[in-house]
Amino acid sequence: MVDKNTASFMRSLCMGQIEEDIILPFPEIPASEKETLRGVISSLEQLLGKRDEQFRKWDRSGEFPPEFVDELRQFGLFGLVIPEDHGGLGFGSAAYSRTLQEVASYDASVAVTVDAHSSIGMRGLLLFGSAEQRAAYYGKLATGEMIAAFCLTEPGSGSDAASIKTTAVRDGDDWILNGNKLWITNGGIADFFTVFAKTGKADDRGHLSAFIVTRDMAGVSSGPHEDKMGIRASSTTTVHLDNVRVPHKNLLGEEGKGFKVAMMILNSGRTGLGGGSVGGMKRLIRLATEQAKGRVQFGKPISEYGLIKQKVGQMVVDCYATEAVVSMVAGFIDQGYKEYAVEAAISKVFASEALNRTADEALQIAGGNGYMCDYPYERMVRDSRINRIFEGTNEILRLFIALTAMNDVGQNLRELAKSLEGVFVDPIKGFGVLSEYALRRAALATGINREGTTFTRLHPALKPQALLFEEGTRDMASAVDRILRKHGRNIIDKQFATRRLGDIMVDLFVASSVLSRVDAALRARGPEKCAHELEIAQTFSAQAKKRIRHNVSEIDANEDEQIKSLADHAFEAEKFPWDTL
């Protein structure tokens, strides 16, 4: 039986264990939410459909008119995750993600406005709020009377959240907050802010705390709308805190545990961004297929040419895989799993990059039209670019994914070393304490089937892809061992090697999600009716195998030092130092 408090599919996989119970069967949206969700999705067409020209206009002007934000309030889009007894819809992660998918298929700026409110702005209240705090704010947040914003980033603190300069100093029953927050989504329209501030000593990087701050508190202000590349109509501003007096009862979670609060908010809210990515991809595929069928070149529609088919086919694979991995993470959250940070980070990395590829290829299929502002492609390319940056840059998340795995393996290697200290003095006793970890790793390395190292419950039609996954798992085990042996304690500074392991782990978790989703389809409809889904499983698995093998091969044979040397040379010169003139 899986312990949902400690179980993690990817952390187990790095230890040589395929935890089928975690990913099978493929998660579904709870039946209790489906009927409400269908009604919401149907109504969104009335609210957001046929507004393409307005969305283009608002993108150019750089903000939504207040009356449109009021429409979002009246529709109830700010109450999606708030419990029903407080006026919300009480959606779980899967239903919420599916709603964001629908919203994003109309306009990314609308999706970001809604998502920043529910996924991160008031998510801390949902996860850590006291009964008193929830009673005070849930109702207003559900109606949109209060729109929420998440205030972590600062001018000198982006990915390095522990280096924030905003301070909170205790003064009797209050805290006095001072500082400046940067690039705050919903900053200009929010009345509820989840603010992170340093509550320890000046030189204590990690002692952060989270606070509920409201706009009506003296000293709270926001700057002008930022002029952005994409998602231009969404509100992004600075937020200033000038001697803001915040009651102690507004402390969110425990004092000094703000970093944990921030990370849990971001992990829990990633399905919103993922759902938005899926919605964007589905719209792009619809636009690209219509464009390719309608555009005739050299006497026939370009949809009949192989290179166009390649683009669209890859879009389909990427979209199916993205929806699978986002749904899997949402399922973990809804089922009560606690350890899903690695999987959530993987879903964000994959979803954001798949959306980028899809937007770029859709624009390419549209040709010159794609580059024109009269068509939606260029705006969707601009809108999609931010996803690789906010809520944790993909570079930082790749390092987090890989370092978590190597830390787990390193801990077990130390335990294994201790258990084998007397193996040559007393071989019988020594081998008797050989750890379970070592046995699993041996099974992985040799390819010998052992309980927990192979798939046993997947549909028989997926046997070839299951074998490819198990092969990839052996490659990952080999990569972890080789990287740790090569770099040891210095691994924290070896970002090229760490990124390669991160990419392997991304491919494996997405592949497992695809296999689980296709398995569910096969059991529901049978192989004959799932021919195309089997093709997706075959394609993704084969592509993942090639990428994994490439990353493993580059652990020892690569051009890392040359690349770093050239970068250092450019940093020193602060320019490209060669010229043909």
Image (cartoon, rainbow, N blue to C red):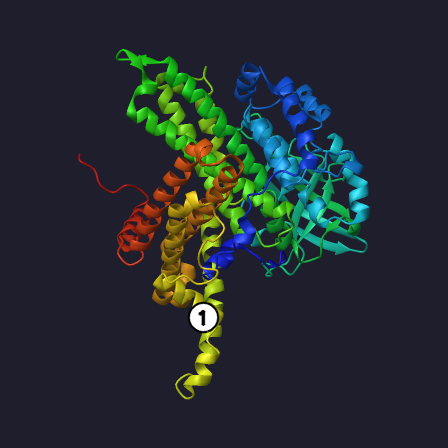
Q: Which residue is mark 1?
A: 413
Counting from the top left corner in percent of width and height, residue 554 is at 30, 54
Residues 431 and 550: in front is 431
- Residue at 55 percent of width and 55 percent of height: 8
Horizontal side, residue 126 vs residue 131: left or right: left
- Residue at 70 percent of width and 23 percent of height: 70
Residues 496 and 300: in front is 300
- Residue at 63 percent of width and 49 percent of height: 166
Horizontal side, residue 18 vs residue 222: left or right: left
Can residue 364 be spotted in the picture?
Answer: yes
Can residue 490 be spotted in the picture?
Answer: no
- Amino acid tagged 1: Leu
Residues 484 and 149: in front is 484
Secondary element under disc 1, as helix, strand or loop, is helix
Residues 376 and 152: in front is 376
The outermost residue toward the left is 581
Report which quarter residue 27 is drawn in.
top right
Q: Residues within 10 Å of mark 1 (few under 14, many from 20)?
A: some
Q: Is residue 407 above or below residue 425?
A: above
Counting from the top left corner in percent of width and height, residue 169 is at 71, 54
Q: Is residue 19 above or below residue 182?
A: below
Counting from the top left corner in percent of width and height, residue 476 is at 39, 56
Counting from the top left corner in percent of width and height, residue 512 is at 47, 47
The outermost residue toward the top is 299
The C terminus sits in image quarter: top left
The N terminus sits in image quarter: bottom right
Report which quarter residue 238 is drawn in.
top right
Q: How many marks?
A: 1
